[in-house]
Image (cartoon, grey):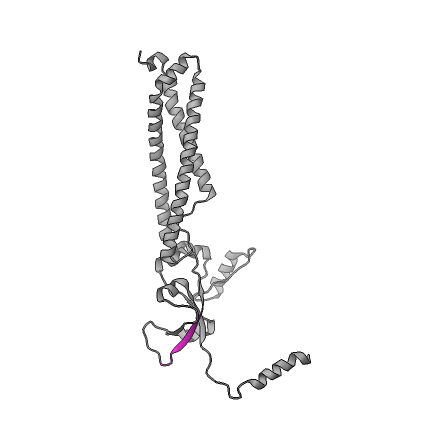
Amino acid sequence: MIHLLAPLAAALLLQDPFPSRVAPPRTIAIDEAFAEAAGLRVGDHLTLSAKPGAGISVPESVVVAAIFERSADPSEIARGDFKARLHLDHLQRISGYGDRVDRFAVATTRTADIGRVIERVNRQAFGFRAYRSRDIAVETSRTFLVVSRFHRAIGVITIVASSVFLLCIMVLKVEERRRDIAALRLMGISRSSVIQSIVIEAGLVAVLGSLLGVLIGWLVSIFVNSHYQELYQTPLEFSILTVPIVVFAVSLSLVLGIGAGLAASWRLVRTPPLTLFGR
């Protein structure tokens, strides 16, 4: 105990008997977009005001203590606001709100009955309205929902158009091989064997084409995310390529390829071989 108190006593004796009464400036944290736009770094001194451009009698000097990363919130991108985080007492004094707040968030456990909590708050706290965070996210992301539905409609139209295009290509390719098919039929090859060979070929082409499309989509997603994340200074991913999407794309391509191969080959195998030779 003596060895622990001795350095402390020595430090107290070496202190200035007349310490300065000027309080150190308060610290704040700003987001990375604010720091990049204003050219700020950790340790820079700023002056805060409750209103933009309004002069204040006593300058409120603060120090940038940290630069935090922006959250991946779609609603923040449309506004393009800069964020600064202050201590609660400091924010109350700067804003002049005192003990009032506009909104606050309450964290709940996984087993909590959120509906019952919302009902109790709305019934007891006059002037307040409680909402689920999920409902607020939906309300603030209406624009992104519209864009998502628009992309879904474009996807459906693209799939239908590509199906017709794939069927036309398969019909043309099979038509070019009508003499080969006629020769196989005259050699005794059954209709089912001819159909199977064409379907297998169409399936392989469809799988290879879908894998090539997945690779192109992955490269495009990387480019889109890198460009817009740098533009909006956000970790939000604008283009996502997930395993279910890849599985769906490959499966859909395989089904369409097999369907196109069946439709194209069935018409030729029903035609007599001599007719296919033009006789």
Q: Is residue 59 magenta?
A: yes
Instruction: Please tell me whether residue 55 is drawn above or below residue 183 in the rendered image.
Output: below
Q: Nearer the viewer, residue 252 or 174?
A: 174
* Relative image position of residue 72 (x, y in whole percent): 43, 56
Task: Examine the rendering and report whether any part of residue 74 can be seen.
Answer: yes
- Residue at 49%, 59% in the rendered image: 118
Q: Quadrant of the N terminus?
A: bottom right
Q: Is residue 6 left or right of residue 200?
A: right
Q: Based on the displayed image, in which of its 4 quarters is residue 71 positioned?
A: bottom left
Residue 268 spot, x, y in % from top left: 36, 19
The quarter in which the C terminus is drawn is: top left
Give the percent coordinates (x, y) of residue 249: 42, 38
Residue, x 45% and y 72% (percent of image)? 27
- Range drawn in magenta: 57-65
Q: Nearer the viewer, residue 20 or 97?
A: 20
Which residue is at 34% across, 38% downward?
Answer: 158
The picture places residue 109, in percent across and down from the top left corner, at 55, 58
Residue sitting at the far right: 1
Q: Is residue 132 left or right of residue 172?
A: right
Q: Nearer the viewer, residue 43 or 97?
A: 43
Rendered image quadrant of residue 97? bottom left
Kindly report the secondary structure that dominates the magenta region of the rendered protein.
strand
* Visible residue check, residue 99: no
User: On the image, which quarter does residue 57 sit in?
Assistant: bottom left
Say above or below: 27 vs 253: below
In this view, 197 is above or below 122: above
Specify the farthest residue to the bottom: 17
Seen from the viewer's position, the closer of residues 194 and 116 is 194
